[in-house]
Image: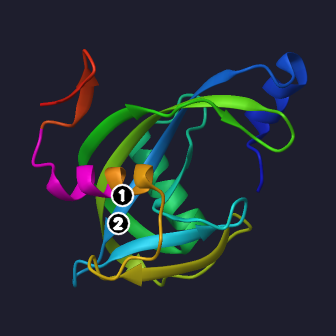
Amino acid sequence: MAIPAFLADLRALVGTRPLWLSAVVAVVLDDADRVLLARRSDDGRWAPVGGILEPGEQPADGVVRECLEETGVAAVPELLASVTVTPPVTYPNGDVAEYLLLTFRCRAVGGEARVNDDESLEVGWFALDELPPMIDAEHERLRHALECEGPAVFTWEGKERP
């Protein structure tokens, strides 16, 4: 998977030390309310589309960019569904990161789902009752996006709110 240039520059300075990064997740629905998922090339797991925000990039712009870059699908953000933090992630090369994840519910407005870069092995639309195997955290993000009617879900004092 390609690493953004700004992150490669930062890693050259800090090595593998833990980094705090901002990222977005796009839970994209089509007109049949199927969800767009990608099978990641780094670990082979199915997940909603997402990625790291570029410095200064607005989160909604980032979620649109990530979706188009990775899947060829043009999407419009409808709702910021949740704001969560991942546990620390250690990559095979030893890099450590923790992510502030902003999960958006989005609506597909164009394009055709396809593998559009080296970050995915497969891309497809799935009925909500026919999802491929995913880790619990991905199911949680889907739940947040599908059930949220606003305001966004967040954790405060160890409890999921609102």
> Would you call the spot at circle 2 few (<14 residues within 10 Å), some (14-19), or many (20 or more)?
many
Res 16 seen here:
yes
Q: Residue placed at 35% from the left, 60% from the top?
A: 27
Which SS class for mark 1?
helix
Q: Which residue is mark 1?
A: 139
Q: Which residue is mark 2?
A: 28
The relative height of residue 81 versus residue 27 in the rendered view (above or below) is: above
Q: CA distance from mark 2 to mark 1?
A: 14 Å
- Residue 42, x across and y down, in percent: 73, 59
Q: Residue placed at 83% from the left, 25% from the top?
A: 16
In the image, 111 versus 86, the foreground residue is: 86
The relative height of residue 94 versus residue 64 in the rendered view (above or below) is: above
Q: Residue placed at 53% from the left, 56% from the top?
A: 66
Q: Nearer the viewer, mark 2 or mark 1?
A: 1
Q: What range is drawn magenta here?
A: 142-150
Name the quarter where the N terminus is drawn.
Answer: bottom right
- Residue 37, x across and y down, in percent: 46, 71
Q: Residue placed at 28% from the left, 20% from the top?
A: 158
7 within the magenta span: no
Q: Which mark is residue 153?
A: none
Tell me: 11 left or right of 74.
right
In the image, 92 versus 114, the foreground residue is: 92
